Amino acid sequence: MDIKQLRYFIAIAEEKQISAAAKRLHLAQPPLSQQLINLEQELGVTLVIRHARGLELTEAGRILYKHAVKIASFVEESTIEVKEVGEGTKGTLSIGVNTLSAEPLPRLLKQFRESYPHVSYKIQQNESDQLLKMVKEKAIELAIIRLPLELNDFSILHLKTEPLRFVASTRFSHSSLSITYEQIRQHPLILPSVEGLGVYHVILEEFSRRRMEPYVLGECSDIAVLLQLVSSGFGATIVPEAVLQMHPGHELQVFEIADATLNASSGVIWLKDYYLSKPAQNFLDLLKG
């Protein structure tokens, strides 16, 4: 017994005549009659009583009809859902975002949801190196990270480049709206994230390129706490400009960095040579568009 036979039987049960059922199914009568005989022989029961007025379901026929309707409905719903997932109109978008890269995500997801309202979301926030590990382990498909990082195993789509800013408390005394690296090196810094990650690495590399050693007081992976520490006068910091937009309300002074070659880049990455779900593909298409 297969789904085709069940659909034939549903039509016979509802039409109560082979001729009407055959017309509904766009079949000739003899093959449909044979399908009914085959089904009865396979089950070893009589499913319909044949009389001059048409067909009448037996008790076994009524039970089969009840289950056949449920099964046919389930198969139809399953087929639609599988196709929708394959097309990306359903399914799950699993994406990670770095602590310092969350700013564009709400806008991007809102735009994506307008086109794919039935997609669900799995969103993970973590440091960039952890996000790389999660993508490698296939816990998530995509990740928005801060660059630079070692990405030999990944494909990458660049998102944006933004300047880094020197940030200090309102009690910090400086006469200009910009500050030089020579001046920054004299002040204790609390750097975002941990050594080896994108922004931390970029900052230290820039000082090294200038043959300077910054006064690094410490590091902090929680941006809200970092900015609170800076606001209190505990130390200064260097962060991407978008971070300040994401965490307003702190009493801070923000300075451009003179002779600025120091920028922060972000991008979305995914595993090379690995099949991406259709929602993930559609999200990348949105970013590329």
Image (cartoon, helix red, strand yellow):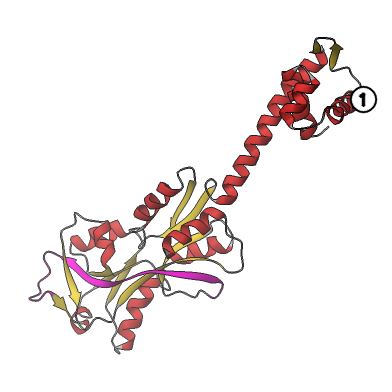
- Against 234, residue 27 (above or below) is above
Residue occupying image coordinates x 78% and y 32%: 27
Please state the horizontal and vertical placement of residue 100, each as a whole percent of the image: 35, 63
- Closer to the camera in the image, 7 or 254: 7
Q: In which quarter of the image is the C terminus?
A: bottom left
Q: How many labels does the image show?
A: 1
Q: Quadrant of residue 231?
A: bottom left
Q: Tell whether 152 sits left or right of 4.
A: left
Residue at (61%, 64%) from the top-left corner?
274
Residue 287: give x, y in percent of width and height: 42, 62
Q: Mark 1 points at which residue?
A: 41
Q: Is residue 95 above or below residue 13?
A: below
Quarter occupied by the N terminus:
top right
Tell me, yes or no, if residue 174 can be seen here. Answer: yes
Tag 1 secondary structure: helix
Amino acid type, callout 1: Gln
Q: Is the magenta stretch mostly helix, strand or loop?
A: strand
Does 164 appear in magenta? yes
Residue at figure coordinates x 74%, y 32% from the top left: 26
Q: What residue occupies the far left of the structure in this picture? A: 175
Q: Residues within 10 Å of mark 1 (few under 14, many from 20)?
A: few
| Apparent side of residue 92 relative to residue 75 in the rendered image (left or right) | left
Indicate whether 110 appears above or below 151.
above
Residue 206 falls in image quadrant? bottom left
Q: Give the range drawn in magenta.
A: 152-177
Visible residue check, residue 127: no
Q: In which quarter of the image is residue 7?
A: top right
